[in-house]
Image: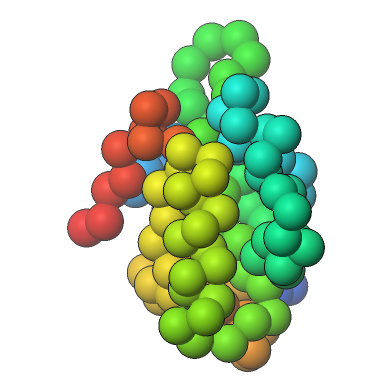
Amino acid sequence: MPKFPTNGGNYENVNEIAEQQGLLFDRRGGWLVVVPKDKRDVASGDDPDFGHLFDHVIRFKKRGRGIQPAVMMISSPYLASSPENRALAEEFASRTGLSVLFDDDRFRVHTVEGSVTIVFWDPNQHDLVED
């Protein structure tokens, strides 16, 4: 099973979150694949600020045989935990059909100070475990 390399660096809790969620670590980056295919055309939208939501992305996929889709990502952009940035993340989620959890340290994977944790997931493919 794919595991996030635990050789130090600026990341932690990736494998633990994958286990808690019943998912597998997929890879870093490539956030667009988590967006349902029929919504990818609006993912970037006409708002260039959406691009600021995605930095240090960790993707998670379903368990199972064969190629499984990525259904959840944790992004750790260098943004303030502000009402404006929360609204931007919520707007992105609304446009793409994803669900969002903004600035919840239970899902922090990027340890560098100054980044905020944003979890996006496809609610049709995954039920977020928040315990």
Q: In this view, does 102 lie to the left or right of 49?
A: left
Residue at x 47% of width, y 24% of height: 63
Tell me residue 68's x, y (percent). Answer: 58, 19
Q: In this view, does 123 lie above or below 87?
A: above
Can residue 58 be spotted in the picture?
A: yes
Closer-to-camera residue (71/40): 40
Color scheme of the displayed model:
rainbow
Relative to residue 66, is residue 27 drawn left or right?
Answer: right
Q: How many callouts does the rendering have? A: 0
In the image, what residue occupies the spot 46% across and 43% down? 98
Nearer to me, 11 or 1: 11
From what the image shows, is residue 40 above or below residue 130?
above
Left or right relative to 9: residue 121? left
Q: Quadrant of the N terminus?
A: top right
Question: Is residue 9 left or right of 126 when viewed as pictured?
Answer: right
Residue 123 in which image quadrant: top left
- For the residue pair 20 and 92, the one nearer the viewer reads as 92
User: In percent of the image, x 51 and y 34: which residue is there?
Assistant: 71
Residue 99 percent location from the top left of the image: 41, 48
Q: Which residue is drawn at 60% across and 37% down?
A: 34
Q: Is residue 13 above or below residue 39?
A: below
Residue reaching furthest top?
66
Quarter of the image for residue 39 reads: top right
What is the residue that sits farthest to the front in this orientation?
Answer: 46
Q: Position of residue 89 (x, y in %)?
A: 53, 63
Is the C terminus in the top left, top right, bottom left or bottom right quadrant? Answer: bottom left
Give the quarter of the image for residue 6: bottom right
**Residue lying furthest left in this view?**
131
Residue 70 in view here: no
